[in-house]
Image: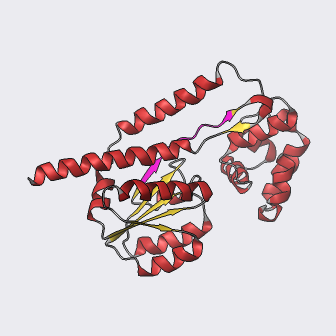
């Protein structure tokens, strides 16, 4: 598995990356038990270089790199306890967290916007964007879903600072988004993002970022399981909070 990733992203690797790859491939058993600092010392590079190496392989960080190495070694342990409990407990934890999250400023942005645009970076994210549109349509709010990169470029040209852009991206890392989102930022267009972690490029350039930690579990036969359901749940809770915001705003005005 790691070998396949190295081949796939070989062109992205610089000399330091190739040196790390060589060490890892020749010492998989040892590296499986190392910390990131130990691997950095053995490869004569910095901790951040190891992190960037993992990210170039489209991994979130050193933790995922170690999981891949353990999978290659066949050393991932079997699941302890109920997998159902792990999944359900995580979902409940996320729901409880967002139930109490203050999103008043985001609701105000939606309320004051002339137009709201939503963009999903992948097929599942686009599905979540469509669900976002469907829910808000029940409030008489028309949401424009941007279908793809070409449409994003055309739409960005007509957007102004009275509009709001809501972007749904699992990783928050996209060269296309980084380039065009910064242009929107310069035009003063509020950018609200939903990502699976808060420390990513999209989150850093967003006016507001909502992030949900999607836990990755090892299942039977050492396969990964992570779910995008949590992002659906967050959008649903955001909708519910907007309904409450409208009621409170109406009561205040009356």
Query: Can residue 120 be spotted in the picture?
Result: yes
Q: Residue at x 27, y 60 (%)?
A: 111
Which of 8 and 32 lies nearest the eye of the viewer? 8
Give the camera-side residue of 51 and 228: 228
Residue 45 locus on image (x, y percent): 74, 50
From the viewer's perspective, is residue 147 above or below residue 237? below
Residue 27, position in %: x, y? Answer: 88, 39
Is residue 188 on the magenta stretch? no
Residue interval drawn in magenta: 209-217
Q: Residue extending furthest top?
A: 81
User: Closest to the observer: 63 or 137?
Assistant: 137
Rendered location of residue 89, percent (x, y): 53, 26
As drawn, the residue found furthest toward the left would be: 254
Q: Eyeballing the image, is 242 above or below 87? A: below
Can I make out residue 31 in this image?
Answer: no
Task: Point out the residue furthest to the right here.
Answer: 26
- Quadrant of the rendered structure where residue 105 is? bottom left
Instruction: Identify the residue at horizontal 69%, vertical 49% (top origin).
Output: 59
């Amino acid at each position: 598995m790691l070998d396949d990733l190295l081949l796939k992203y070989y062109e992205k690797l610089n000399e330091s990356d190739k040196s790390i790859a060589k060490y890892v491939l020749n010492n998989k058993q040892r590296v499986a038990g190392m910390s990131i600092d130990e691997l950095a010392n053995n490869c004569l590079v910095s901790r951040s270089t190891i992190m960037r190496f993992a990210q170039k392989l489209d991994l979130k960080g050193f933790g995922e790199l170690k999981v891949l190495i353990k999978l290659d070694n066949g050393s991932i342990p079997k699941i302890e306890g109920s997998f159902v409990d792990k999944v359900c407990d995580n979902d409940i934890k996320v729901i409880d967290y967002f139930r109490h999250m203050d999103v008043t400023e985001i609701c105000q942005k939606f309320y004051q916007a002339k137009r709201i645009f939503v963009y999903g970076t992948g097929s599942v994210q686009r599905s979540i964007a469509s669900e976002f549109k469907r829910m808000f349509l029940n409030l008489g709010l028309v949401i424009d879903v941007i279908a793809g990169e070409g449409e994003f470029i055309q739409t960005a040209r007509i957007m102004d600072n009275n509009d709001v852009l809501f972007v749904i991206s699992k990783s928050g890392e996209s060269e296309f988004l980084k380039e065009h989102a910064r242009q929107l930022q310069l035009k003063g267009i509020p950018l609200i993002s939903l990502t699976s972690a808060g420390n990513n490029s999209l989150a850093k350039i967003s006016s507001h970022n909502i992030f949900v930690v999607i836990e990755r579990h090892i299942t039977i036969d050492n396969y990964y399981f992570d779910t995008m359901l949590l992002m659906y749940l967050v959008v649903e809770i955001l909708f519910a909070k907007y309904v409450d915001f409208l009621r409170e705003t109406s009561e205040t005005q009356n």
